[in-house]
Image (cartoon, helix red, strand yellow):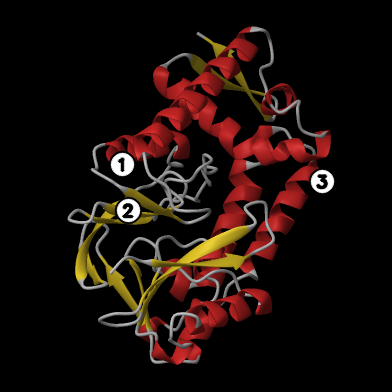
């Protein structure tokens, strides 16, 4: 059977998030919205519209450990016999969520944000928003979590779905591909608009993995698939994934080139680049572009087009 889309309102910039339902041969839910009463009510109604209830769910399969995709998983397992399946890469975000959030916030506060050079009040606002995100999901008891390999196979809806690891938007993101019916459950890998490359904290002793270069590699992997229908994490299903990929790649490379031009013109810090590249946004909203901008800089650094250097406490970028 084809996955059944259940749209849940989340009230963030994306507006809504998708869950997908298989009712046969067992009841499986792909992703689980955010922890809110409104989201829960819409999920219950969406299940009922397809003849099932929360108590019928046998598995919740999580594409990636962002709170809008697993926020209700803890409540579902509390009200059913369901287990929650997630890649082994993402499992700690479900079973040890407080520690994972603490590690991410410590990394942002200590390592990532200070050399960016934003005002301290902006850094505190970013951390405050992260704390709010942490409250939008409940941990899942470890005994109710089942892990799968990031290159494995899942049986859902009577067919085998290939698991494909697609880092970029999230380090632990996976998508599910059904080759016979040419369907792709794309999570936030393929959306109508380019997803932000969320910066994950590295393991102790390791360097940060540049998210946007990883996203472009994952786009290239998606380009090799024969797909008729994409079932995205946000928005309506769509076809012609090659057109979406081409458009997003062109947009990213165009913005990368714009970033390089600005650096050549003397905008050498992230605050200066944010003000120029996101001048169409109100000043207080421009920080939302921080993650994409860091991604463009990562691409330029990888290409050898720029170098970075510390002047005082702030990172500056110089064209080569």
Q: Is residue 71 left or right of residue 89?
A: right
SS class, disc 1: helix
Q: Where, by quadrant of the figure, is residue 222 drawn?
A: top left
Percent coordinates x, y for residue 19 in the rendering: 47, 67
Marks 1/3 in contact by CB < 8 Å: the verdict is no
Nearer-N-terminus badge (1/2): 2
Q: Residue at x 73, y 58 (%)?
A: 128
Ranked by sequence position, the earlier of labels 2 and 3 is 3
Q: Position of residue 116 (x, y in %)?
A: 66, 34
Q: Which of the two discs, 1 and 3, sits closer to the camera?
A: 1
Q: Would you say the residues marked 1 and 2 are in contact, meaning their CB atoms lie under 8 Å apart?
A: yes
* Nearest to the observer: residue 152 or residue 273: 152
Spatial distance from mark 1 to mark 3, Cα to Cα?
39 Å
Q: Is 144 situated above or below 256?
A: below
Q: Which mark is residue 194?
A: none
Identify residue for label 1: 222
Circle 2 crowding by C-alpha within 10 Å: few under 14, some 14–19, many from 20: many
Q: Read off the residue under disc 2.
A: 184
Q: Is residue 106 above or below residue 81?
A: above
Give the residue number, with chain letter if any, for mark 3.
121
Q: Is residue 264 above or below residue 63?
A: above
Callout 2–callout 3 Cβ contact below 8 Å: no
Measured Cα–Cα span from mark 1 to mark 2: 9 Å
């Amino acid at each position: 059977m084809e996955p059944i889309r259940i749209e849940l309102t989340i009230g963030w910039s994306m507006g809504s998030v998708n869950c997908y339902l298989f009712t046969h041969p067992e009841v499986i839910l792909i992703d689980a919205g955010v922890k809110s009463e409104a989201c829960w009510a819409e999920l219950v109604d969406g299940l009922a519209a397809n003849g099932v209830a929360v108590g019928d769910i046998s598995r919740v399969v999580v594409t990636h450990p962002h709170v809008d995709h697993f926020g209700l998983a803890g409540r579902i397992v509390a009200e059913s016999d369901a287990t929650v399946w997630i890649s082994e890469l993402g499992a700690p975000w479900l079973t040890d969520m407080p520690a994972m959030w603490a590690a991410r916030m410590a990394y942002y506060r200590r390592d990532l944000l200070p050399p960016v050079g934003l005002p301290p009040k902006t850094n505190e606002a970013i951390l405050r928003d992260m704390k709010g995100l942490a409250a939008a999901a409940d941990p899942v008891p470890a005994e109710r979590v089942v892990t799968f390999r990031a290159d494995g196979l899942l049986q859902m809806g009577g067919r085998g779905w290939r698991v494909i690891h697609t880092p970029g938007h999230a380090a632990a993101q996976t998508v599910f591909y059904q080759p016979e019916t040419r369907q792709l459950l794309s999570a936030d890998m393929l959306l109508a608009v380019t997803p932000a490359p969320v910066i994950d904290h590295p393991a102790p002793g390791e360097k940060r993995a540049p998210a946007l270069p990883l996203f472009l590699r994952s786009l290239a992997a998606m380009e090799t698939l024969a797909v008729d229908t994409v079932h995205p994490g946000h928005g309506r299903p769509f076809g012609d994934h090659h057109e979406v990929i081409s458009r997003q790649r062109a947009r990213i490379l165009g913005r990368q080139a714009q970033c390089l031009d600005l650096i050549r013109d003397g905008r050498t810090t992230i605050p200066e680049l944010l003000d120029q590249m996101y001048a169409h946004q109100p000043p207080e909203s421009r920080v939302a572009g921080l993650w994409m901008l860091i991604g463009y800089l990562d691409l330029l650094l990888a290409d050898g087009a720029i170098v970075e250097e510390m002047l005082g406490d702030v990172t500056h970028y110089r064209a080569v």
